[in-house]
């Protein structure tokens, strides 16, 4: 039996691809190495576009509604921006990802969990996906198996990440009373709506975060491997400072580490019968670390291209998918990479940027737009650059040189 589409990986990219492809009439099989719901090292912040892009309700897995952002400079200066309306959400990734995978099954996809794919072989008229227990054939494969993608490596599309393309993160879910969470993060105007916090320079040339959930706080820290210095010590210091500042205890027994691709999309996104989606393709913002929206978007695009190929349309190939990704997600990531190199070039640059935001309500709003994905990165970069040159010329020159 030859399937229309095999998807390797059941995270947001794979599950979104599976649901869309199944609803388009394709015979879809998903291999997922874990058993869901499973722990996932991630802050769990969702931008508004994530909810808007899905064709089902995610209210059941939303932990908190966000209405603002606090940016902390290396010296402790805080630039706080907020809106009257919701700016984003936080979720527990184990719940969110499990919901997406269940929705893929509801649409008709077959999902096989607790199964690791070990190899992929492109043949003349099909492609074989090999696990420890079986060999399945399909017309197409989507590799949505994350930053350490077996599909990318075995197909030769991407061998490894360079140190200046990959970040290491530590993350811990800290159990906490709801009252303490709202005391720390609650908005003065809308007490049930929360702020998220980002701490620039918490580790050299990196940042940390604190994202509130219903009954826990997600604390994390990350930096590019190429500039990493005293990373474990920075993590311990950040958690200790958080405890002291807010008079809470932090249990790090749920601490995990993971890698995040922050170098932009990889050169080869596809072969004749393979498309890479989500983290496996490098679809994570180098500026903000946000990847869930890009994962869902790329998974859905891959499904649409798969439909065209399976239906025999001569004008649709896997190269069509790569082209669309480069013209949409790729443009965002290229500009995000420029912003990343600018902001994280030095501790001084981080400090300058936050100080500009702290003194300027317009810059605060632009920073909120950037982090929460309200506008394309190109628009954010243009607005910020013009504002800095108009109102903060001296600091802007120091930042840009």
Image (tube, rainbow, N blue to C red):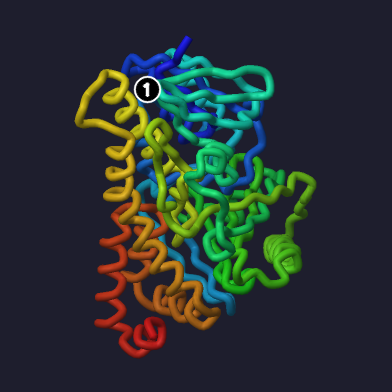
Q: 362 or 23, which is in the foreground?
A: 23
Q: Residue furthest bottom?
A: 394
Residue 167, compared with residue 339, is above or below; it is above
Q: 268 or 245, which is in the foreground?
A: 268
Residue that badge 1 annotates:
21
The spot of residue 38 in percent (x, y) is: 65, 32
Q: 132 or 89, which is in the foreground?
A: 132
Corner quadrant of residue 321: top left
Quadrant containing the C terminus in the rendered view: bottom left
Q: Residue furthest left?
A: 315
The spot of residue 180 in percent (x, y) is: 66, 50
Q: Residue at x 54, y 69 (%)?
A: 72
Q: Residue at x 40, y 44 (%)?
A: 269
The spot of residue 30 in percent (x, y) is: 52, 22
SS state under label 1: helix
Crowding around mark 1 (Cα neighbors within 10 Å: few <14, some 14 to 19, many 20+) is many
Q: Residue at x 46, y 51 (%)?
A: 284
Q: Does the rendering let one see residue 192? A: no
Residue 230, compared with residue 86, is above or below; it is below
Q: Does the rendering let one see residue 145? A: yes
Corner quadrant of residue 387: bottom left
């Amino acid at each position: 039996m030859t399937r229309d589409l095999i998807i390797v990986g059941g995270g947001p990219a794979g599950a979104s691809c599976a649901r869309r492809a199944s609803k388009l009439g394709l015979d879809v099989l998903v291999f997922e190495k874990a058993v869901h719901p499973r722990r996932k090292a991630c802050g769990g912040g969702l931008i508004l576009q994530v909810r808007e892009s899905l064709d089902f309700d995610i209210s059941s897995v939303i932990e908190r509604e966000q209405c603002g952002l606090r940016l902390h400079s290396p010296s402790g200066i805080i630039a706080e921006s907020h809106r009257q309306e919701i700016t984003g959400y936080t979720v527990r990734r184990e719940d969110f990802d499990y919901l997406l995978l269940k929705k893929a099954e509801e649409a008709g996809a077959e999902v096989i969990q607790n199964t690791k794919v070990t190899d992929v072989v492109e043949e003349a008229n099909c492609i074989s996906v090999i696990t420890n227990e079986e060999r399945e054939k399909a017309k197409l494969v989507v590799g949505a198996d994350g930053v350490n993608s077996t599909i990318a490596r075995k197909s030769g599309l991407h061998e490894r990440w360079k140190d200046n393309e990959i970040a290491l993160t530590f993350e811990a879910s800290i159990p906490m009373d709801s009252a303490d969470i709202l005391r720390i993060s609650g908005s003065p105007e809308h007490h049930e709506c929360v702020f998220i916090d980002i701490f620039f320079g918490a580790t050299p040339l990196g940042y940390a975060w604190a994202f509130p959930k219903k009954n826990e706080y997600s604390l994390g820290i990350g930096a590019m491997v190429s500039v990493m210095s005293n990373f474990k010590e920075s993590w311990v210091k950040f958690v200790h400072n958080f405890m002291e500042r807010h008079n809470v205890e932090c249990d790090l027994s749920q601490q995990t580490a993971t890698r995040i691709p922050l170098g932009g999309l990889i050169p080869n996104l596809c072969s004749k019968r393979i498309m890479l989606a989500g983290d496996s393709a490098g679809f994570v913002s180098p500026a903000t670390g946000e990847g869930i929206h890009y994962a869902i978007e790329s998974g859905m695009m891959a499904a649409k291209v798969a439909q065209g190929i399976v239906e025999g349309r001569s004008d649709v190939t896997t190269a069509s998918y790569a082209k669309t990704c480069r013209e949409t997600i790729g443009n965002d990531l290229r500009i995000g990479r420029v912003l990343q190199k600018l902001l994280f070039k030095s501790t001084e640059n981080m400090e300058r940027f936050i100080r500009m935001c702290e003194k300027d309500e317009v810059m605060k709003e632009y920073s909120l737009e950037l982090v929460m994905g309200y506008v394309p990165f190109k628009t954010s970069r243009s607005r910020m650059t013009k504002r800095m040159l108009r109102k903060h010329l001296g600091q802007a020159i120091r930042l840009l040189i």
